[in-house]
Image (tube, helix red, strand yellow):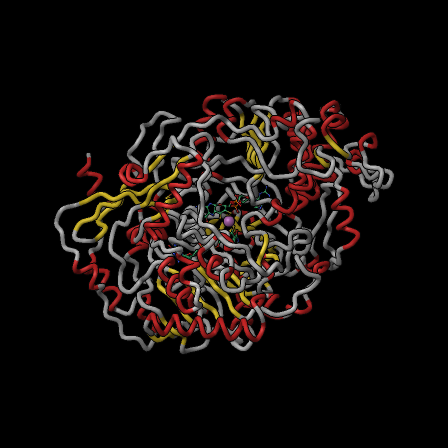
Amino acid sequence: MKSQLKKLLAPKFTRRDFVKSSSALGGLAAVAGSVSLPFKSSKVEAATTTDEKVVWSACTVNCGSRCPLRMHVSDGEIKWVETDNTGDDQYGNHQIRACLRGRSMRRRVYNPDRLKYPMKRVGKRGEGKFKRISWDEAFDEITNNLNRIRKDYGSEAVYLNYGTGTLGGTVTKSWPPGATLIARLMNLSGGYLNHYGDYSTAQIAAGMPYTYGNGANNSFSDVENTKLIVQFGNNPAETRMSGGGQIHHLMEGKARSNAKMIVIDPRYTDTAGGREDQWVPIRPGTDAALVAGMAHVMISENLVDQPFLDKYCVGYDEKTLPASAPANSDYKSYILGRGEDQTEKSPAWAADITGIPADIIIKLAREIGSTKPCAIFQGWGPQRHANGELAARSIAMLAILTGNVGVSGGGTGTREGNQAIPFVRFPIPENPVKTAISMFLWTDAITRATEMTAKADGVRGKDKLDVPIKFIWNYAGNCLINQHSDINRTHEILQDDKACEMIVVVDNHMTSSAKYADIVLPDLTTSEQSDFCMDGAAANMPYFIFASQAIEPVFEARSIYDICTELAKRLGIEKEFTEGRDQEGWLRHLYAQTRELDPTLPSFDAMREQGIYKRKAEHFIAHEDFRKDPENNPLATPSGKIEIYSERLADIAAEWELPEGDVIHPLPVYASTFNGWDDPKRKDYPLQLTGFHYKSRTHSTYGNVEQLKEAAPQQMWMSPMDADQRGIKNDDQIRIFNEHGEIHLTAKVTPRMMPGVVALGEGAWYAPDKKGVDHGGSINVLTTQRPSPLAKGNPQHTNLVDVQLLKKA
Ligand SMILES: Nc1nc2c(c(=O)[nH]1)N[C@H]1C(S)=C(S)[C@@H](COP(=O)(O)OP(=O)(O)OC[C@H]3O[C@@H](n4cnc5c(=O)[nH]c(N)nc54)[C@H](O)[C@@H]3O)O[C@H]1N2
Ligand SMILES: Nc1nc2c(c(=O)[nH]1)N[C@H]1C(S)=C(S)[C@@H](COP(=O)(O)OP(=O)(O)OC[C@H]3O[C@@H](n4cnc5c(=O)[nH]c(N)nc54)[C@H](O)[C@@H]3O)O[C@H]1N2
Ligand code: SF4
Ligand SMILES: [Mo]
């Protein structure tokens, strides 16, 4: 068995091949231009033992899971990769098995794209022309520019860009930026411009606190107590894939309750994949209308939980409407057409907007309204839209109207809950700079910073920004280009090196973002260092991993701890930064503190030996205390109750300056948006394009592993109806385009896609030709930098495009 497995996973190419493919000017050598590269790391060559050892490591990328990897190392090289072998197949004692991405880790470690030396840009930003420099030169260059920029503009001109490439680490943790070693370094030496929000959850995270005080929901494991599961735009089969991931808990829970599952998504997802009882395709950006249509049925047919609404909620009807609210501004009046817009939100009204037939809306409403308990979940697909704050709050309304909040088998209608073992993280001193922008508006903070205000652009901590971003740290992120919206606009902005003057990228690979760096620093992968890894989305079996160093650093790569220590020396804060510890010293220190919190945890050395520590937990029931005793356990909203009508949002709506068409509303209403299904632009761009997170990659990470690209190719999903209209067949070459840019790719023609909507997995590597046409299928060539109204977040699933046939397959 073992030898068979070994054969299956055995490397298809040896290190020699890797060396050969690099020297054939693949990967880095091609972009490195003028550098001549010796291809072997002397350190790796020096390690020549023939005995195989097995080392616990981990996959720490941002896929929402986190997996242990067991590296089989001989001759100083990872030869094959295995995963968790602790526990068994029994649910609750199960193995945290890695997905194919993690199992291909050695193809990422030994990838021809691997950054080998510090480099300095010699061409224009984005051209990928660099020259090799020494580490000392790199450190001096960075420190001199940082000091100069801070002197000229202040620390507010220094920005830490979003990056989640290694958010699962402790020393290596890349997200949130404010919890990284770079933040520690910057805060000890003057600070930096903060950001709030994230590309994952901007709109839901901004919206839900107004309703519930936070975004909590029951854990997936608790679906073992439900009768009906409703998933809005939630696809854990791709987005929480591992054996420890949420999909496992969902499936095991569902098997125990035998509950029916309804999937509401414009795509027939892998989570549906034969396990669903009903797929309801919906037009992107219209969930709020579907909910309003269902609410109409529930109210008309007495399916709402009136005692729950009276006791626990504010603003369902006039009885609980706050005194400050105008007459008829309650939710019931909105639904029945007695509110401001005088429009009844009938199933027929909702059908027009959502593309879901009215009779299906009625049946759904009756089923959800009469099956108790009912577990309603939303992924982050519905909220990554121009009206995403309203969509997220609306979906939660279904759980509220039906009184499912705070009970086992029910839930709040937000994303499924996670549980974790408390762990002490790296201490980050306070940032002396208090100003913050939305993480999505960093490009604006380069081009029009001093025009950006609190009321128009969501600047926090100050009424307006005083200085533009002049220095960017980009650690373990590809959001400089690939993952940020409107790549062509970003390219234009970054081209001007008088605007943002200095960009430092710390990564493993020559990504599209790295090509825009002034200085690129080669970081170690998880395999080349030791770290504690955690924060995987676990339901009732939280865990953490001790990843040990499996191999020596390749080429000249250095750890982020080492990099920051060297910079700290030059900034005169080495002692403050290191506190006299090295990386191992910090791991021991943080773990000792963690064990003070919980003395039952294994010792440091035992953890190193055993690799993974798992714990059994109860199902998590969100707001259970509040449900039992709302007086003594109020929610974190101003009223302590569920705020269907939010006075705070009413104030914001009155005060903020919003562009034409943007809606912030005290109620969770439906609002049509820019680039939506009813935007007049649809004349030119008739198809709605939505994104999704794809099993082939974790965003862009693993996107350069050939085997994964073959297993799950990057194609644009399109319904047979839309394809027929354009003479497109499966695998034909197509062009996808709008006012932002153009992609050439092949089509996947499939009934799994709703007509009128096309979809592209996000994260494919941007590969522009000389005319700027992308041949990689990177969706951000087609997305906009216009933010959503409340969160000022990324509406990256709200797009309009057209598609044409280019070439038959
Ligand atoms: N259109 C569209 N765009 C999107 C999304 C979408 O749905 N649609 N999703 C958004 C979301 S939710 C997110 S979270 C962001 C994610 O955006 P990013 O956080 O930029 O995620 P990745 O593309 O995975 O980039 C991670 C980077 O970290 C690097 N990396 C991996 N491991 C290491 C390491 O050990 N050390 C270092 N130094 N680097 C490492 C990888 O090489 C890669 O360049 O994308 C957002 N962009
Ligand atoms: N394999 C893999 N796993 C990942 C990631 C990855 O890149 N690859 N990324 C990780 C990260 S950082 C994040 S933030 C999460 C992302 O997790 P999510 O944001 O939940 O994932 P998405 O695929 O963007 O969206 C989920 C589903 O919503 C659907 N959808 C889009 N628009 C709408 C809409 O308007 N209404 C409805 N009802 N459905 C809609 C999409 O078709 C998709 O199937 O995934 C994590 N897991
Ligand atoms: S990508 Fe996610 S699911 Fe796959 S191995 Fe890595 S952590 Fe696990
Ligand atoms: Mo994300």
Residue 790 location, x and y as percent?
Answer: 68, 51
Q: Quadrant of the C terminus?
A: bottom left
* Quarter holding residue 38: bottom left
In this view, 20 is above or below 250? below
Count the marks: 0
Residue under the point 60% across and 55% down: 799
**Residue toward you, 676 or 420:** 420
In this view, 776 is above or below 49? below
Q: Quadrant of the N terminus?
A: top left
**Residue toward you, 65 or 256:** 65
Camera sees residue 119: yes
Give the farthest residue toward the right.
327
Residue 447 location, x and y as percent?
Answer: 61, 70
Residue 786 location, x and y as percent?
Answer: 64, 60
Residue 554 location, x and y as percent?
Answer: 27, 60
Residue under the point 40% across and 72% down: 128
In the displayed structure image, the side of residue 434 where residue 122 appears, left or right = left
In this view, 611 is above or below 742? above
**Residue toward you, 272 or 206:** 206
In the displayed structure image, the side of residue 690 where residue 144 appears, left or right = left
In this view, 744 is above or below 345? below
Quarter for ligand 3?
top left
Camera sees residue 804: no
Residue under the point 61% across and 45% down: 205
Residue under the point 45% across and 46% down: 425
